Amino acid sequence: MSPVYRWLAFAASIFIVPLLEIHNLTKIFPLGESIFGGGARGEIRAVNDVSLDIQSGETLGLVGESGSGKSTLGRLVLRLIEPDSGSIRFDGHDLLGAAHSELRHLRRDMQIIFQDPFGSLDPRMRVEDVIAEPLIIHEGMRPETRRLRVAELLRAVGLDGSAMHRFPHEFSGGQRQRIGIARALALRPKFIVADEPVSALDVSVGSQIVNLLAHLQRQLGLTYLFISHSMPVVRYLATRIAVMSRGRIVETGSTEQITQHPQDAYTRSLLEATPEVVT
């Protein structure tokens, strides 16, 4: 690499502002009242002083065991739950200081794919209405235009347009997750939190969903926070990896660095537990 190229790369790393900036984020949950009286039994720091940046167009894989705080962090980022301290900036905006009207506008660019494809879709709503709901709330599209947009979204996730007239219970788990992805894409977001999107699916179907997410990212320029307990899945999809344990980030680095030269003992234990790469 030439000195000029090195300098340009260094300058770019300084002046490019991340799409998402998380600083010293903390969320504490009380354990509740003691059965013996005397007040609360203590607290759990589900997210403990976490700082992370995510660049536009990348996938940051957030990996750790169940209960490590990954899903709580994902929900904090979207302000689905409120932090106790810290700061979150999205696309230059202070999320925690945003007024309701500003936050409503920002939510168009920030969406989530939930873990459970069975529980995340309203069983009383047809697929058309499930996917169209954000379009109605945020854009007020006319019914004809909305229907065309829903059909387009279904095709984008590998489903036939006729699926819009059916109910979620008529689909398999993998198909329901595709419907959930279509709903997340409805407003053309910049950033998606994918919260364990394949953990409830069998391996072959999960691999199809991971490949779909990778394809959509290339096609639409999406940025992902991809949450998983599976190092092989994260290794396959992520640009960078952050390893989380007991509410803290214990290690962050490029996918190659984390998987080939892990520095933390916890990271090494995750790699040893799941050595095979997903293909």
Image (tube, rainbow, N blue to C red):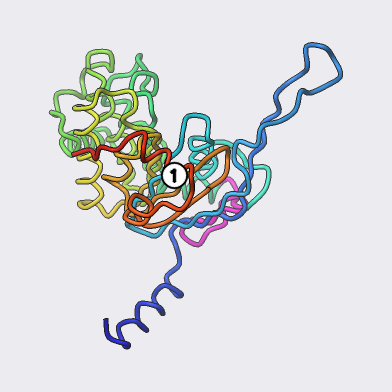
Q: Amino acid at mark 1?
A: Thr
Which quadrant of the figure contains the N terminus?
bottom left
Residue 38 lies, in percent from the top left, at 86, 19
The residue sitting at the right extreme is 38
Residue under label 1: 267
Q: Secondary structure at mark 1?
A: helix
- Is 255 situated above or below 71? below
Is 246 situated left or right of 178 in this image? right
Residue 23 lies, in percent from the top left, at 59, 55
Is 47 situated left or right of 138 in this image? right
- Is 64 situated above or below 256? above
Q: Residue at x 37, y 19 (%)?
A: 122
Front residue of this view, candidates 268 and 82: 268
Q: Residue at x 20, y 20 (%)?
A: 165
Question: In the rendered structure, does residue 91 fall within the stretch colored magenta?
Answer: yes
- The magenta-colored residue range is 87-100
